[in-house]
Image (cartoon, rainbow, N blue to C red):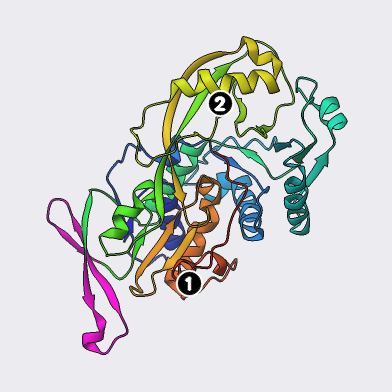
Amino acid sequence: MVIGGGVMGSALAYWLTRLEPARAVIVIERDPGYEQASSVLSAASIRQQFSTPVNIRISQASIAFLRNAAEELRVGDDRPDIALREQGYLYLADANGAAHLRATHAVQKACGSDVTLLQTIELAQRYPWLNTSDLSLGSLGLTGEGWFDGYTLLTAFARKAKAQGASFVNATVSGLATFDERLEGGSGKRISEVILADGSRIACSHVVNAAGPWARSVAAMAGIELPVDARRRTVYVISCPTPMPPFPLLIDCTGFWIRPEGAKFIAGLSPTDDPNDLPLEPDYDAFETQLWPALAHRIPAFESAKLERAWAGYFEMNTFDHNALLGPHESIGNFLFMNGFSGHGMQQSPIIGRAVAELILEGRFTTLDLSELLFSRVGADRPLLETNVIG
């Protein structure tokens, strides 16, 4: 039983039914149109410029899957086009951030990432539209980084999973029924049924929390405190009359990001005030007071830019260490997590889906060892901090 049919839940259903076709897989999704799904409202990008090796390894495996997604997720003769664009990420650093950029670059190179450091003069030569006056260093992903159509990836995972036998149910989960195995000589609790809002119950062998920003409330149904919050992020669609090729996904030292989206651009920034569970309404004031001035400083052509529209979605923010929380809870062995991706879940979904499927089917990771990301590190107070979090 998978609670949540976004990109994580759908990727898991795909891998479960691919690796074990006889496995009965049910995905519960309350928003089948994905109107509030983070998967659809994200910027759908992929990078290798992380600070922790495990995230770099995941991205390297994910980009390989995405490059072949049309064939991997083909249903009959219908091959999904996720419109993958490998135009790179460009991290910018001023004097205060240069040392950190060099340190993370060393980690990325040690993992085999195709990234390069650019001095200020090199940045100016490669990107003449960029104001480099207050910059000290840049880090550019030459291959294996870029962006894609997140909605197409999500729906392709779901469609392929259904073709392989998975069932998707439009319903809201209202509770989890547990029983104590210790009364029967076992070692802990197990979830026996998932309770739906209409009062019906579905028996299950495993339950996976793939509820994204709403994962905390699902965990609470089993009496578990999950350090995952729903943090609102606004994505702004901007037009600018000045051609500026080539243009990678740029992360400025002030905290904003921007990338091309067709003939326009999309951009965002980390809010100064970041409470939980805000309404999904765009923060237009932040564009006027924070983003536009920073954009116009870094890219002077954006002085004449125009805000076309905006939307808001939730970051599934892991407040413990900003990394994925995977696998079973120590006291409820058949309750598994795939939560807390802190903005990099879409890009990690192909590999995380397989990893959690392996935990269910084999009891261990078999393709890529993601033991560092197991949920047990929370109880052990052993954070694995990711410092390269965007937004």
In this rendering, does residue 167 appear at all?
no
Q: Which residue is mark 2?
A: 266
Find residue 181 and report its horizontal and vertical position in percent: 25, 82
In the rendered structure, the answer to whether residue 28 lies left or right of residue 330 reads: left
Name the image quarter holding residue 299.
Answer: top right
Name the image quarter holding residue 332.
Answer: bottom left
Q: Residue at x 40, y 48 (%)?
A: 229
In this rendering, does residue 84 appear at all?
yes
Find residue 83 and report its horizontal and vertical position in percent: 58, 34
Q: Nearer the viewer, mark 2 or mark 1?
A: 1
The relative height of residue 150 versus residue 65 in the rendered view (above or below) is above
Find residue 35 and report its horizontal and vertical position in percent: 34, 34
- Can you name the residue that lies furthest to the bottom here? 185
Q: Quadrant of the N terminus?
A: bottom left
Which of the marked residues, 2 or 1, is nearer the chain's N terminus?
2
Q: Would you call the spot at circle 2 few (<14 residues within 10 Å), some (14-19), or many (20 or more)?
A: many
Q: Residue at x 43, y 25 (%)?
A: 283
What's the magenta region? 177-203
Q: Amino acid at mark 2?
A: Ile
Alpha-carbon span between mark 2 and mark 1: 39 Å
Q: Residue at x 56, y 71 (%)?
A: 366
Find residue 340 and report its horizontal and vertical position in percent: 46, 53
Query: For this rendering, which residue is in front, 4 or 98?
Result: 98
Q: Which residue is mark 1?
A: 380
In the rendered structure, the answer to whether residue 33 lies left or right of residue 124 reads: left
